[in-house]
Image (cartoon, rainbow, N blue to C red):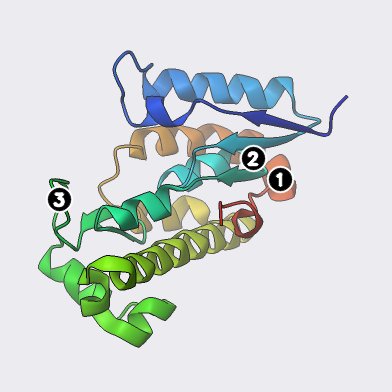
Amino acid sequence: MKPWIALGGIVPNLLRAPQAISHSRILENLLHFCQEFKNQKLHVFGIGGTATLHIAALLGIHSVDSSGWRNRAARGLIQLPGTGERVIADLGNWRGRRLSEDEFNQLKNCPCPACRQHGVEGLKASGVVGFSNRATHNLWVLLEEARLIEEHLLARTYKDWYKEHLDNTMYRPLIDRLVETSLSQYAGAIDSRLISLSNCLES
């Protein structure tokens, strides 16, 4: 028996592509998958958003990978902790939600390497410089999100923390459902199978 099993094809369904299956069905399939292969390590392709990391952790998935942080940077998008993506640079015809005043103020105090060195203007820049700053910011946000998720799951404070931390995410109902099932039934398994994002996001 192989020690690792990889699962792909998640992205089109999460993004609601034509003929995509429902989010609840995805969750049911992932729960079934985890139970069927509970003695093997699980890797899932295409999970790389601040909200979907919560789903992966609550399912006890060992590792994930995604190039979404780079793709967003190329489209002028940045990720915000616990919130989602926002347009920061007008590049082509890409559409998306703009920063609110509160989010802009939050971004001005972002401690990621790109924001510390270049500030918000660095994220807005065009060309290679702007892309590099946005990509650095997005990856840092994902790694920090993974760290916070792990910290709160291990401390048994996740159930209260995520309600304040996760804001306006389309995946919130799925996360709520997982919290009620996974944290009560599979707490020990989650502790031993927390995701390790730092070694598995695409470089």
Helix, strand or loop at mark 1: loop
Residue at image mark 1: 193
Residue at image mark 3: 92
Q: Nearer the viewer, mark 3 or mark 1?
A: 3
User: Which badge, 2 or 1, comes first in the chain's sequence?
Assistant: 2
- Which residue is pictured at 32% across the width and 73% down the height? 129
Q: Is residue 120 found left or right of 164 in the rendered image? A: left
Residue 146, given in percent of the width and then of the height, sits at 53, 57
* 57 vs 203: above or below: above
Residue at image mark 2: 60
The part of the image, by quadrant, that contains residue 6 is top right
- Viewer-proximal residue, 98 or 154? 98
Q: Is residue 162 found left or right of 32 in the rendered image? A: left
| Mark 2 → mark 1, Cα distance in angstroms | 5 Å
Helix, strand or loop at mark 3: loop
Amino acid at circle 3 = Gly
- Which residue is pictured at 46% across the width and 62% down the height? 139
- Viewer-proximal residue, 86 or 203? 203
* 136 vs 2: above or below: below
- Which residue is pictured at 15% across the width and 62% down the height? 99
| Mark 3 → mark 1, Cα distance in angstroms | 41 Å
Q: Are marks 2 and 1 in contact (CB under 8 Å)?
A: yes
Give the number of the disc on residue 37.
none
Query: Is residue 108 in view?
Result: no
Amino acid at circle 1 = Arg
